[in-house]
Amino acid sequence: MDPVRNPYAPGAGQRPPELAGRDRELQQFEIVLERVARGRPERSMVVTGLRGVGKTVLLNTFKSMAMQRLWGTGKIEARPDQSIRRPVAAAMHMAVRELAPRHRAPERIEEFLGVLKAFAMRDPSAAKGTSHWSPAIDVPAGRGRADSGDLEIDLTELFVDAAAVATDLGVGIALFIDEMQDVQAPDVSALCAACHELSQSGGPLIVVGAGLPHLPSVLSASKSYSERLFRYARIDRLDREAADLALIAPAESEGVEFTQDALDALYVAADGYPYFVQAYGKVAWDLALRSPITAEDIRVSAPEAEEELAVGFFGSRYERATPAERDYMHAMAAIGDEPVATSEVAEGLGRKPSSLSPARDSLIKKGLIYSAERGLIAFTVPHFGKFLRSQPV
């Protein structure tokens, strides 16, 4: 069939043509937006899940929902080797720029931009009174607000002032943070403290994060009250009805159908994971001769889809691991696909658990595995164990 008309989108963060199975989360965020708009107290929100379940897609959809309500929005992607000070400054600048044309007091916007510039320029690693970086904000940097060099104090003051600007317009500001588990520990603490202050003052600013399944434990390790600070939404694979809808609805818009046997085969192959649904659906469309797409089409196309996943989805991550880290992951995969005990991995490698700590910690930092709970680890990527078992040790 015509590949140009292929509706499926197996890309990193690309919104699928049919966002199936996420109605509950969308409704939750709609409630958050409505409550904040009415001045009601509301928690910030955190979405967690494995790779490929659609966290970034959901985060981008939340951002669109906030923009439709004329909120100011900004988004960052956390990196383990970078403080959030500068990315947050850029995101807040974008959010306030969205609000500025509607504000009736330009001096209020300029005052906030001065605070924002001071916040952005305050680099604790630079010599006193200097900075290695100056943001493109055409106002003088303010003094005495959000410029202490202590990120917890500065971020709190910045958020409070930004919320005040949004209050003037009767709207809110939303800061979206992707890969939130990669925020550095001191910055997580500062972020939680700032959100805590906002939750007490009722300021219309929320933080919406997305990250791997262990993100809640990262937050709770930083601040004991974090479990009450955020509304948590754990997303997983799609159920059968949602997975079928993700395939059927886009195809119908192009006048194409699937047989029931084809849908059965696709669900077995993709196991309900949204990224896999799109990947298998795309290849099946390209290789099918005509509508309806049949189980035979799925059988023929599955090897090509699996090869593409092996290179782009699994292989790219596997290549980032050192030989020692690969040995560790192979030992995990040999035990099974469920969370495994670190002691079992050590036993499988004939090593002491303590000697394997560097490899385990490095894999966690690289986002390849996570600590499901104390003493247990698991892959962040669905079906990664199956992929590893097909690779030479």
Image: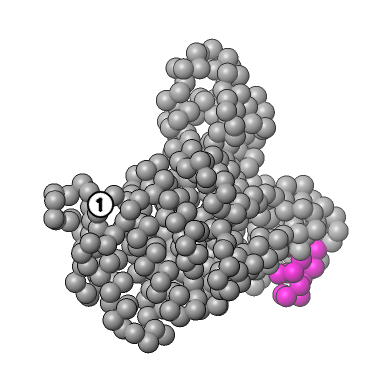
Which residue is drawn at the image coordinates 59% and 32% (left, top)? 373
Q: Position of residue 178 (x, y in %)?
A: 48, 55
Packing grade of label 1 (10 A; few <14, some 14-19, many >=20) is some
Which residue is drawn at the image coordinates 28% and 74% (left, top)? 111
Identify the image quadrant of the N terminus: bottom right
Q: Residue furthest right?
A: 260
Q: Is residue 65 visible?
A: no
Q: Residue furthest front?
A: 201
Q: Position of residue 106 (x, y in %)?
A: 31, 83
**Residue 64, above or below 312:** below
**Residue 229, above or below 392:** below
Q: Position of residue 192 (x, y in %)?
A: 45, 50
Q: Is residue 302 left or right of residue 61?
A: right
Q: Is residue 280 left or right of residue 244?
A: left
Which residue is drawn at the image coordinates 50% and 13% (left, top)? 352
Identify the image quadrant of the C terminus: top right
Q: Is residue 97 left or right of residue 30?
A: left
Kindly identify which residue carries mark 1: 149
Q: Is residue 355 magenta?
A: no
The amino acid type of the residue labelled 1 equals Gly
Q: Position of residue 21 (x, y in %)?
A: 72, 60
Q: Residue furthest bottom?
A: 104
The picture quadrant where one finds residue 121 is bottom left
Q: Is residue 257 magenta?
A: yes
Which residue is drawn at the image coordinates 47% and 34% (left, top)? 363
Q: Which residues make up the magenta segment? A: 247-258
